[in-house]
Image (tube, rainbow, N blue to C red):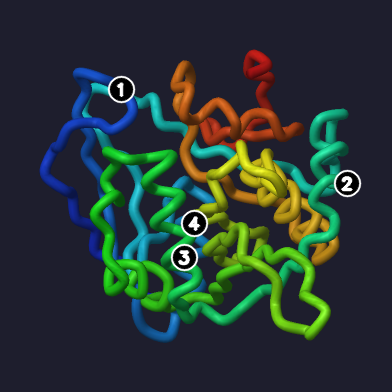
Amino acid sequence: MTAPFRFPRFFVTTPAPCPYLPGKTERKVFTELSGAHATDLNDALGRIGFRRSQSVAYRPSCLDCQACVSVRVVTDEFRPNGTQRRLIRRHGDLVVTACKPWTTEEQFALLRRYLAARHPGGGMAEMDDVDFADMVEQTPVKTYIIEYREPSDEDGRPGRLVGACLTDQQSDGLSMIYSFFDPDTDTPGARPGLGTYIIMDHILRASRARLPYVYLGYWVEGSARMAYKTRFRPIERLSPEGWRRFEPARG
């Protein structure tokens, strides 16, 4: 019996300070996604907790910690709560477009505003336009950058870009690689709750396409930065016994 693709070679990164838990170090195991079977490999690895970054699939492989847990939303059973329903109505006028993974100056400007406001000291804070283009355009799998725009003006010109998400379509769901949005919530015409709305749009989009899951990446219990991921129910986490539903504390 012939395997559909050659078993990949895996590598391990040098330990570095953990960005989520003070005093901890992180280490990742990774492999290259390339060739005719990159999509199949990415799908298979995604089901066991790997994430994609450009042409690499990776997952945590820390020596003294297993806090990072892969989580995914079950799309056909998702029912928005009251706050989420209000956000769907509030942002229901947005024009949502699944674009090819090509970057624009407008996307990069929005990313810079988002990073400066939400993650000023993060690892992406110094990202330039070339780095951004690499993140979006270097993909060996089916990828979109989904744009969220305000309605067109009277002359038909596209409305203001207020959000975007780099998204992979896998055989069993959508994988949200990275989302960013207008961080200004204090000015007239501001749109609070965009991050939540973008996730809900992906859940509803996946459900319409009969894709059973939306992959949200890693969740760390007790990390305030990660708490938003468990507000979308039902949710599953990857355990040594496979994917299991769980009920985290309401955050």
Relative height, residue 245 to residue 113 (above, below) = above
Q: How packed is label 3: few (under 14 Cα within 10 Å), some, or many (20 or more)?
A: many
Q: Quadrant of residue 15?
A: top left
Q: Residue at (50%, 44%) from the top-left corner?
A: 217
Amino acid carrying mark 1 in the image: Leu
Give the foreground label among 3 and 2.
2
Residue 28 in sight here: yes
Do callouts 1 and 3 mark residues in contact (Cβ within 8 Å)? no
The secondary element bearing badge 4 is classed as strand
Give the residue number, with chain letter if any, for mark 4.
177
Q: Closer to the camera, 4 or 25?
A: 25
Amino acid carrying mark 3 in the image: Asn
Q: Position of residue 37 (x, y in %)?
A: 44, 79
Q: Closer to the camera, 66 or 185?
A: 185
Give the residue number, with chain letter if any, for mark 3.
42
Give the residue number, with chain letter if any, for mark 2.
89
Amino acid carrying mark 2 in the image: Arg
Q: Closer to the camera, 96 or 66?
A: 96
User: How many numbered discs?
Assistant: 4
Cα–Cα span, label 4 and label 3: 13 Å
Give the foreground label among 1 and 3.
1
Residue 1 in sight here: no
Q: Which image quadrant: the C terminus? A: top right
Whichever of labels 1 and 4 marks the residue nearer the N terminus, that label is 1
Cα–Cα span, label 2 and label 4: 25 Å
Q: Quadrant of residue 220?
A: top left
Q: Residue at (68%, 19%) from the top-left corner?
A: 247
